[in-house]
Amino acid sequence: MTRSQSSERFDLAVVGAGVVGLATALAATRRGLRTIVIDRDAQANGASVRNFGFVTVTGQERGAMWHRARRSREVWREVADAADIPIIHTGLWMMARRPESVEVLEAFMATEMAVGCRLLSPAEARRRCPRLPAPGLAAVLESTIELRVESYTAIPRLAAWLVSEHDVTFMRNTAVTGIDLPSIHTSRGCVRAERVAVCPGDDLSGLYPERLGAYALTRCKLQMLRLADPGFRLPSALMSDLGLGRYRGYADLEAATPLKARLAVEQPEHLKHGVHLIVVQSADGSLIVGDSHHYAATPDPFSHQYVDALILDEFSTALGIEPPPTIERWSGTYASATDRAIVIDAPESAVRVAIVTCGAGASIGFALGEELVTSLFDSGVAA
Ligand SMILES: Cc1cc2nc3c(=O)[nH]c(=O)nc-3n(C[C@H](O)[C@H](O)[C@H](O)COP(=O)(O)OP(=O)(O)OC[C@H]3O[C@@H](n4cnc5c(N)ncnc54)[C@H](O)[C@@H]3O)c2cc1C
């Protein structure tokens, strides 16, 4: 820690430099607040750099989450331009192969969530992307709204831009061990700030464990694959029937009930391992393909071949092509809850803890950051 950091008093200290912490820092600096971000890692290493970088609106839970996603997508656009973060591709193709899935798509199209969406026939989809034979294709929901960034480089660029353009201070390699405002105790000394936003990702036992213990939180592990360039460009991000049974914007529709029943009969192993298909493409043509969902307080650290095979099975069934060779495998974890999509807790009047508990932090993080700053600075709290 430099002398100025130890003597300076910040308006806001943000614990955690994942997408939620960075989004909160951005919202604070846009209000002219002097902000410090503290993270225990030397560089971003959590869920925010292990994900698809898929900023999804279509399919988010109806209501508050969908609105958060729309707002966040707007901010991603602004930030991408300003911070030189490439948008690798846009849009989503939700590829339906069962009649029950088409019913879900049609029901979705009748909702307010269908802005920017339309249905494509199989013939139109094949004309648009002849390299995707998708033999069983019955319809495609095309959304033009989604964005895809390469998280592993986008998150560091976002942080660097917060330093260069917004004068945010970063303390890395620094664990926050306790908060006793205005003092924030860290592994490298004391930082002083008026207010604190704790954005700890899936660290549920570090700060305020007794508060977080009141929520039914656990952790979710996801397996991910990078496949070699298939030799053509995807029209957008791709998903399949399994996603219609999982993502709440579709799955909560009444029309999804028959599909979920059919999936339970026809793809029980995929459901057992929480497998559904997302395929996005990187600038070099390689594909990021996932994912699976296994829940535990401490998930095992291994990537299981059997689970990868289930993901790849859905890939070849939905797309109708052989998966290109796997060139990377990794897993990631996020905090999870069955009864809520986010936690915003106020352990003290000048402290907020924010955790995304549904695996959508890249999609809703910027809106959440704005909510945190509003809650901390517009509700008359005192340090
Ligand atoms: C494999 C995978 C794929 C996903 N795909 C998508 C996707 O495509 N789209 C989408 O919207 N979402 C996706 N998600 C979810 C999304 O990545 C997360 O919701 C989001 O990254 C959470 O961000 P965060 O900032 O809360 O957490 P994190 O990125 O985990 O960051 C938390 C940070 O807090 C720091 N920290 C914690 N405690 C302390 C402490 N006491 N002191 C100092 N530092 C501390 C950690 O070091 C860490 O850097 C995916 C997640 C995974 C794992």
Image (spheres, rainbow, N blue to C red):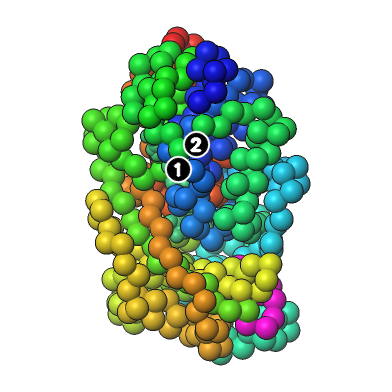
The image shows residue 285, relative to residue 255, as above or below, that is below
Q: Residue at x 42, y 19 (%)?
A: 190
Q: Residue at x 68, y 29 (%)?
A: 166
Total labels drawn:
2
Judge whether residue 354 can be spotted in this image: no
Q: Relative to the observer, which residue lies in front, 178 or 292?
A: 178
**Of helix, strand and loop, which mostly describes the magenta segment?**
loop
Q: Look at the image and give the residue range highlighted in magenta.
A: 230-238
Asked whether the beta carbons under mark 2 and mark 1 sit within 8 Å of each other, the answer is: yes
Task: Give the residue pinned by disc 2.
Answer: 172
The image shows residue 225, relative to residue 209, as above or below, that is below
Split into 4 quadrants, where in the image is the C terminus? Answer: top left
Residue 231 on the magenta segment: yes
Residue 301: quadrant of the picture: bottom left
Identity, as a three-letter code, of the amino acid under mark 1: Asp
| Crowd band around label 1 with a 10 angstrom C-alpha radius: few (<14), some (14–19), many (20+) | some
| Crowd band around label 2 with a 10 angstrom C-alpha radius: few (<14), some (14–19), many (20+) | some
Q: Viewed as shown, does residue 299 lie left or right of 31?
A: left
Q: Relative to the observer, which residue lies in front, 62 or 207?
A: 207
Q: Relative to the observer, which residue lies in front, 289 or 243?
A: 289
Residue 274 on the magenta segment: no
Task: Give the residue pinned by disc 1.
Answer: 41
Report whether the residue tagged 1 is closer than 8 Å to ligand 1. yes
Residue 378 picture location, percent across and down: 54, 17
Secondary structure beneath dot 1 equals loop
Residue 315 picture location, percent across and down: 49, 80
Identity, as a three-letter code, of the amino acid under mark 2: Arg
Residue 68 picture location, percent across and down: 55, 42
Q: Earlier in the sequence, mark 2 or mark 1?
A: 1
Residue 125: quadrant of the picture: bottom right
Q: Residue at x 51, y 46 (%)?
A: 43
